[in-house]
Image (cartoon, helix red, strand yellow):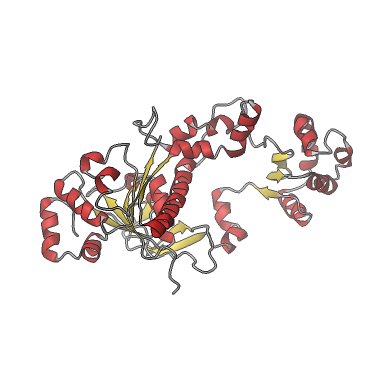
């Protein structure tokens, strides 16, 4: 079996919810040994974020929520009680054996445990220490608790999402969390590269708000260049026309015309010779300026054909068009199936012996990702990891359990 690119990298994962676990799951998919540290008896908050839960062997629900499963594969779960001195000492022993420490406590929250970057860097000069927070380590909001929903609000994406004239709308998934996790994983890889060259570790400061502002992307720069505040456009694009959802004979399609040639091809396929020749619409710049007039004229043509006629017919002439799938249709879509975006992993608590998950979207030709470990049950690997990483024996494990530093099954 081909060695994975992050094989040999060990991560002390003190994260929960979504941003941090997304980061460490991605690194685990690439081969890192991710040790998920959880509070005894409680674990990651998302273990209780259900229903739905995995169906157990007796037909009832297990404690494995779908939300928890989505971001925790390729990890091993170890329980450590960080509130106890013994647990803190155990954590420090483990961190010495790790390359990366990822945490998403409130700013300064780990100082009381002796686990801040300043506490650890002297004894671990090569440690990559990544902090993921709502608002960052500095600034007037640094001490605030941060959640994806808040980041979407403060960061502006909600002001441009949704139908004009209705309340601001968040994105349907925790996208600020997910993207923060992705940025954090890239930063960790860069820091590892630097450490490999110099031996120097460093502290990485990633937060939801910075991430959200960064992925305002073109609309953010539209404002910075023009001084005009973007607003809700529903499904329209600020800089391209026609680019929106249209009703057709039996449903809805997305039409995404990206250039003037595609516009003319749409006109030909639709039989809209009048719109092809209209001087108000011959270039994208003119179509943007006259979008209301064009969008008033297009429905008469769009309603004449079915979803499949539009999607298949426009694909044949090179014009981007797609259906609006619900999530069931997504996983039934032949392209999604061909790309292997659903996987099933063995899970001992599941009635059918497996749990369905969403695959990693990255396809590497030489070192493809591997799905080695299903999302772990709480504390599932405590004994194995402590023996493997620290070389402890049964007597020491028993002592850990007595002091409350950890729980051993």
Q: Nearer the viewer, residue 196 or 382?
A: 196
The foreground one among 31 and 225 is 225
Query: Where residue 331 appears, x then y in whole percent?
Result: 55, 56
Count of labels shown?
A: 0
Say which of 53 and 216 sits in front: 216
User: Where residue 120 appears, x then y in whole percent?
Assistant: 26, 48
**Would you identify the image quadrant in which residue 115 lies?**
top left
Q: Is residue 71 visible?
A: no
Q: Residue at x 54, y 52 (%)?
A: 328
At x 74%, y 48%, the residue is: 306
Q: Is residue 402 left or right of residue 39?
A: left
Q: Quadrant of residue 78?
A: bottom left
Quarter of the picture containing the N terminus is bottom left
Q: Name the residue at the front extreme.
A: 198
Does any portion of residue 112 appear in the rendered image? yes
Q: Residue at x 85, y 42 (%)?
A: 272
Q: Nearer the viewer, residue 59 or 185?
A: 185
Q: Answer left or right for 244 relative to 355.
A: right
- The percent position of residue 292, horizontal first and vertical second, equals 75, 30
Question: Residue 247: horizontal and vertical position, in percent?
Answer: 71, 40
Quadrant of the image containing the C terminus: bottom left
Left or right of 400? Residue 267 is right
Residue 62 higher or lower than 239, as above or below: below
């Amino acid at each position: 079996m081909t060695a994975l690119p992050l094989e040999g990298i060990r991560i002390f994962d003190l994260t929960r919810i979504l941003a941090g676990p997304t980061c460490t799951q991605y690194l685990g998919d690439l081969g890192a040994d991710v040790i998920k540290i959880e509070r005894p008896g409680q674990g990651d908050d998302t273990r209780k974020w259900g229903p739905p839960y995995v169906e157990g062997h007796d037909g009832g629900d297990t404690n494995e929520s779908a939300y928890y499963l989505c971001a925790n594969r390729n990890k091993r779960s170890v329980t450590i009680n960080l509130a106890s001195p013994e647990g803190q000492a155990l954590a420090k022993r483990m961190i010495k054996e790790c390359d990366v420490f990822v945490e998403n406590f409130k700013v300064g929250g780990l100082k009381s445990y002796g686990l801040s970057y300043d506490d650890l860097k002297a004894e671990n000069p090569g440690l990559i220490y990544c902090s993921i927070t709502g608002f960052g380590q500095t600034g007037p909001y640094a001490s605030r608790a941060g959640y994806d929903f808040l980041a979407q609000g403060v960061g502006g994406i909600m002001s441009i999402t949704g139908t004009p004239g209705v309340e601001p709308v968040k994105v349907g998934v925790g996208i600020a969390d997910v993207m923060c996790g992705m940025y954090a994983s890239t930063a960790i890889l860069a820091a590892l590269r630097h450490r490999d060259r110099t031996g120097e570790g460093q502290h990485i400061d990633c937060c939801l708000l910075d991430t959200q502002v960064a992925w305002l992307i073109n609309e953010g720069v539209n404002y910075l260049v023009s001084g005009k505040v973007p607003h809700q456009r529903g499904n329209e694009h600020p800089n391209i026309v026609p680019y929106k959802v249209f009703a057709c004979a039996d449903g809805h399609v997305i039409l995404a015309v990206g250039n003037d040639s595609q516009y003319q091809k749409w006109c030909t396929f639709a039989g809209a010779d009048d719109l092809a020749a209209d001087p108000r619409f011959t270039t994208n710049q003119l179509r943007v300026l006259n979008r209301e007039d064009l969008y008033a004229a297009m429905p008469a043509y769009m309603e004449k054909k079915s979803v499949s006629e539009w999607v298949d017919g426009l694909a044949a002439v090179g014009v981007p068009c797609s259906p609006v799938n619900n999530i069931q249709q997504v996983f039934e879509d032949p392209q999604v199936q061909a790309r292997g975006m659903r996987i099933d992993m063995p899970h001992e608590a599941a009635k059918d012996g497996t749990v369905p998950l969403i695959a990693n979207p990255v396809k590497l030709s030489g070192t493809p990702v591997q799905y080695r470990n299903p999302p772990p049950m709480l504390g599932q690997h405590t004994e194995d990891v402590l023996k493997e990483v620290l070389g402890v024996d049964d007597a020491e494990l028993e002592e850990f359990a007595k002091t409350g530093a950890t729980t051993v099954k």
